[in-house]
Image (cartoon, helix red, strand yellow):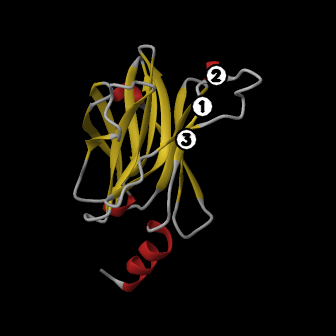
Amino acid sequence: MNYFKHLWNKLFIDSKWNIAYKLKDSATSDEKNVYTSIPFQTKSSWYADPFVVEYDNKNYLFCEAYINKKEKGCIAVWEIGNPSYPPTPRIIIENDYHMSFPFLFTVDNVWYMLPETSENGTLELYKSVDFPYRWKKEKVLLENIKLVDSVVFEENNRFLSYHIIPITTNLWFFIFDFENF
């Protein structure tokens, strides 16, 4: 491992991360500032970049699952508020390279995910095969580019995305035509 990656891991990865949530119908005056902490931190992994979506009357938390031994992140999901669900998120997408920031959105009632895959030098689009647990790589949208924290939004019947280029202050915008998928 190179020196800078080792230094980064020591300074930031060894830190304690925590994800917390609050259900929207728990906003009574007594509970409005009460959050439930999810104890995902372990010696072998930690979790970050949470995205919560509601589907079929259930709340799902998608996140980066960083596996210390592999020194990379994967994409995981956890059902909020289900006591029978495993106590830690379930890994749903793992590649040979780091993945994080699982941004989710829908087009014509189909779930898509645009996770951060800058270590691979790509911008990849995943499509749900069986939400929320099975996903397939639908398309590599861009290659030979390092973009992080991509977000998709709809404006004037077009889907736009913005991306951050690491180590710069540049913010890039792209227009993608989702009708061709």
Can the viewer see residue 174? no
Name the kind of residue labelled 2 in the image: Ser
In the rendered image, residue 122, in percent from the top left (x then y), is placed at: 34, 55
Q: Determine crowd level at label 1: few under 14, some 14-19, many 20+ residues with C-alpha closer than 10 A.
A: some
Image marks 1 and 3: residues in contact by CB distance under 8 Å: yes
Name the kind of residue labelled 3 in the image: Ala
Q: Secondary structure at mark 2?
A: helix
In the rendered image, residue 150, in percent from the top left (x then y), is placed at: 49, 47
| Residue nearest the observer in this picture, 149 or 47 | 47
From mark 2 to mark 3, how far is it between C-alphas? 14 Å
Q: Residue at x 42, y 72 (%)?
A: 9
Q: Secondary structure at mark 1?
A: loop
* Residue with the mark numbered 3: 20
Can the viewer see residue 94? yes
Which of the image's four quarters has the C terminus?
Answer: top left
Name the kind of residue labelled 1 in the image: Lys
When the figure is inspected, residue 3 is found, relative to residue 175, above or below; the finding is: below
Image marks 2 and 3: residues in contact by CB distance under 8 Å: no
Q: Determine crowd level at label 2: few under 14, some 14-19, many 20+ residues with C-alpha closer than 10 A.
A: few
Image marks 1 and 2: residues in contact by CB distance under 8 Å: yes
Q: Is residue 10 left or right of residue 156?
A: left
* Residue with the mark numbered 1: 22
The picture quadrant where one finds residue 167 is bottom right
* Residue with the mark numbered 2: 26
